[in-house]
Amino acid sequence: MEAKGSEWWSGETVAVVTGANRGIGLEICRQLADKGLIVIMTARKPQEELSSSAKQFLQEAAEMGRKNVIFHTLDIGQEQSVLDFVDWLKLHVGNIDILVNNAGIQTADVDWGFLKQNNIDVRTFLGTPNCGSGTSESHELAKECINNNYYGTKMLTNAILPLLRPSPYKARIVMVSSVAGMLYYLRDEELRKQLSEVEDLTEQKIDGVLNLFLEDLKSEKGMEKWPLKLPAYSTSKAALNAYTRLSASKLKAIACVNSVHPGFVRTDITESTGYLSAPEGAENVVRVALFPVGGPSGHNFLEGEDSEF
Ligand SMILES: NC(=O)c1ccc[n+]([C@@H]2O[C@H](COP(=O)([O-])OP(=O)(O)OC[C@H]3O[C@@H](n4cnc5c(N)ncnc54)[C@H](OP(=O)(O)O)[C@@H]3O)[C@@H](O)[C@H]2O)c1
């Protein structure tokens, strides 16, 4: 397939999508495959244990004789799984053009039904005390959330970097982040400063912020510094956004790296609350992945809008 107009991609363009067993990730795969790209659809479960909608997508692709959808197991939180996947990519695929880091979890207990019944949008929920639940979670669950959303995403991204195709179009790395990860929700100026000064940002600095969060949570002291709602999820996505900026600066010669909030989307993570369908949420991510050549890098998109971090 030939690239045409602002469509820089072709039938040889390869996109890896994580967390595609359900929700937004599955729809990202569907939309990229419909545009003719080669899609490496990944999920932490083996193919035979995928959700019925993921199985159906793969079955329909096979029935239509589509050769551009390939499934591989990948758990971004397990080092061996990441290493096995990248070895397989090297052997069977070679270079890749797009990495969509979509896999993510949210571990705080949230009464989404309360938000739905009271017609409360996610930003009001995140910013308002005594508005629904989601204010606390155990140290163990918070650690799992941070390990998965931040360290897992970083581990996969670092492992895949050598496979990014050098090209005039530049490779694309999209971090599926969240409005909850905006610095605004960190309630401490020094913490906001640490993650916002991009010239001084380092991976060690991001680790330091995450370690402090986990220490404060464990000691139950100092939690007033951290996001009011979904503290581990928000902090993990704030770290991911900082990593986006850091990576964009490091990789500026070869890749565009951006974060995107897909919108408040009706998937399992929100117990099917939200104002967008999964395909609509996926569109917001795909748009960023396929920006025309010369597009932004090191930016944060809230749905379609270029936003501050
Ligand atoms: N829905 C929203 O309103 C919303 C808003 C802002 C941001 N987001 C972000 O959008 C992304 C997709 O969320 P969603 O709404 O589609 O939620 P979802 O329906 O809960 O789907 C999350 C997907 O991530 C996968 N996953 C989690 N950890 C993984 C790991 N270690 N390795 C591989 N896959 C893993 C899950 O796998 P299993 O199926 O095996 O559990 C699941 O398929 C997440 O990063 C989320 O934070 C969503």
Image (tube, rainbow, N blue to C red):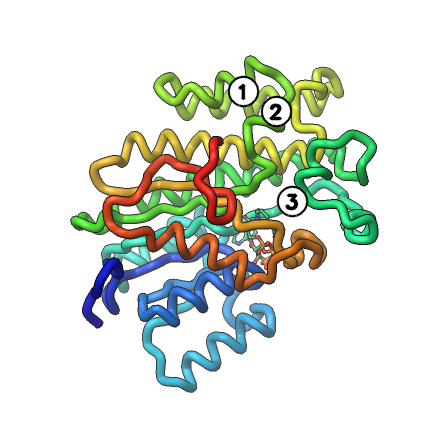
Which amino acid, by three-letter code, is at mark 1?
A: Arg
Question: Where in the figure is residue 121, as x and y percent of width and height?
Answer: 70, 45
Helix, strand or loop at mark 3: loop
Question: Where in the figure is residue 84, as x and y percent of width and height?
Answer: 38, 54
Residue appearing at x 56%, y 42% in the figure: 178
Which amino acid, by three-letter code, is at mark 2?
A: Leu
Tell me the distance, in whole angstroms, between the alpha carbons under discs 3 and 2.
17 Å
Is residue 123 in view?
yes
Helix, strand or loop at mark 1: helix
Q: Which residue is mark 2?
A: 186
Is 63 positioned to the left or the right of 302 in the image? Answer: left
Q: Is residue 29 above or below residue 265?
A: below
Q: Which residue is mark 1?
A: 192
Contact (Cβ within 8 Å) of mark 3 with mark 2: no
Contact (Cβ within 8 Å) of mark 2 with mark 1: yes
Nearest to the eye among marks 1 and 3: give it: 1
Label 3 residue near ligand 1, CB within 8 Å: yes
Q: Counting residues from the N terminus, which is met first, the one under dot 3 or under dot 2? A: 3
- Classify mark 3: residues with Cα within 10 Å, few (<14), some (14-19) or many (20+): many
Residue appearing at x 27%, y 64% in the figure: 92
Residue 106: image tag: 3
Question: Where in the figure is residue 57, as x and y percent of width and height?
Answer: 49, 75
Quadrant in which residue 256 is drawn: top left
Which amino acid, by three-letter code, is at mark 3?
A: Gln
Residue 220: image tag: none
Q: Counting residues from the N terminus, which is met first, the one under dot 2 or under dot 1? A: 2
Is 85 positioned to the left or the right of 262 in the image? Answer: left
Residue appearing at x 33%, y 72% in the figure: 68
Is 177 positioned to the left or the right of 157 in the image? Answer: right
Question: Where in the figure is residue 29, as x and y percent of width and height?
Answer: 44, 64
Tell me the distance, in whole angstroms, between the alpha carbons under discs 1 and 3.
22 Å
